[in-house]
Every structure is written in structure tokens, then in C-alpha cells.
Amino acid sequence: KAGVTQTPRYLIKTRGQQVTLSCSPISGHRSVSWYQQTPGQGLQFLFEYFSETQRNKGNFPGRFSGRQFSNSRSEMNVSTLELGDSALYLCASSFLLDREGTDTQYFGPGTRLTVL
Amino acid sequence: LAKTTQPISMDSYEGQEVNITCSHNNIATNDYITWYQQFPSQGPRFIIQGYKTKVTNEVASLFIPADRKSSTLSLPRVSLSDTAVYYCLVGDIQGFQKLVFGTGTRLLVSP
């Protein structure tokens, strides 16, 4: 089974621009979460989508947004880029069912965004 | 999600067994314990998950005492390729989609 894929793997933008990152979850996974990783702040949760709806949101400004499509693929958008947005953006998917038990998130390789 | 405390770094040599302990004093009844491994510039990789006692898979073992206030990830016979950051996370199924990562433990395996 193919893993989580993210495109592009590397991206260079300048301040003020906007960027869209894409994530394709593992086949059958319905939940997609996004994380930002920086040397200073570590891994931080951005938001999570399930069935095209945002269910959970982290503590990030409104410049960070996302969406999920009917095939569970997800995109993340960052508008008005700032230097501090330079980071590794990670997408993770999980096969969430309405049942008791555990669940596991599987991460993609990430998109390395550099803002100049 | 319950807060976790891990050692910032650990050193080991090839072939040795490595045990990384995580403290989670405020773990709740419905919480599970999950460990991830991360290499530089890559996404975290799921290692193991457990609720109580002992869990073993082809990669590691997870030991959880009866009070569940701590857990120990055991990596048998480590190799150079096990050099990575290891994260301990605690939470229930509602929190699995919004993982809270701590600083992790940076394991360095030397020849």
C-alpha cells in the first residue's frame, strides 16, 4: 500500500506571496492532519480534516488554511508569507472509524518551504 | 493530551539495547501511549503503541507499569541507522488526529 505523499517536496517563495501544498493520504484513510515543524517550535499541529470538514484546529493565524476533497486528498494554503513560515510542513493520515480503540497517524515526507 | 517528559538526548553504541523512558504522570484512563521515530527532514514514523503491560513488534518493545505513569521504549541491538529523534505521545482516540509532540529524545548511536 502506498504511503502518504506530499507535493512539492521543496518550495522557495518570497515574503508576501502565497503557497499551496498538497497531500494525498493512504488509500482508505479519511482523516488528514497537517503539522508545522521548525527548529525553534518543534512539531506543531495546524488542523485536521475529516470528510471534507475541518474538525480540529491548532493555534495558528488565519493565514493558514486548508481543505479536503471528496477523495480525501487535502491541500494547505498559506497566504501573505512571512519569513517565520519557513518550515517543514507535514501531512499525516489515519483510518478513523467510529469505534472504540486506537488509531495511528502515518506521516508523509513533508514539504520544505523556504521564505526569502 | 497528557504532558510527557523524556530525556533530551541519549548516546549508545552499535549492538547495545537502548531504553528510553517517558514520564506521563497525568495520563488519563482512556489514553494510549504512542512512540514515533523521526530522521532529519523526514516525517515521523510510527514505532509502537500500547495501553498497559508490554507490547512487542518487529522493531521495538514498549513496557508500561501498572500505574501507567511512565513507559519505556526498548530498542534491541541498535545500529547506526537508529540514530534519530524519538517522541513519546499520550492521548485518547479523540486526540490522535491532533498529536502534541514534545521535544523528543535525540538518540545518537556510535560505532
Image: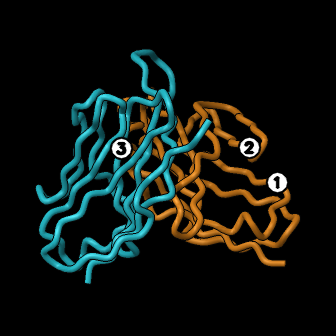
Give, as a three-letter code, the residue at label 3. Ser
Q: Residue under label 2, please give it.
A: B61
Q: Is residue B43 left or right of residue A44?
A: right
The chain drawn cyan is chain what?
A
Q: Position of residue A3 (x, y in %)?
A: 56, 43
User: How far apart are the alpha carbons under marks 1 and 3?
Assistant: 31 Å
CA separation in Å, label 2 and label 1: 8 Å
Q: What residue do we see at 29% from left, 27% from top?
A: A51
Please name the amino acid that badge 1 sits on: Pro
Residue plotted at (68% across, 32% down): B53
- Looking at this view, is A26 or A58 the one in front? A26
* Tag 1 residue: B76
Q: Earlier in the sequence, mark 2 or mark 1?
A: 2
10 Å crowding of disc 3: few (<14), some (14-19), many (20+): many
Subunit of mark 2? B
At label 2, which amino acid type do we have? Ser
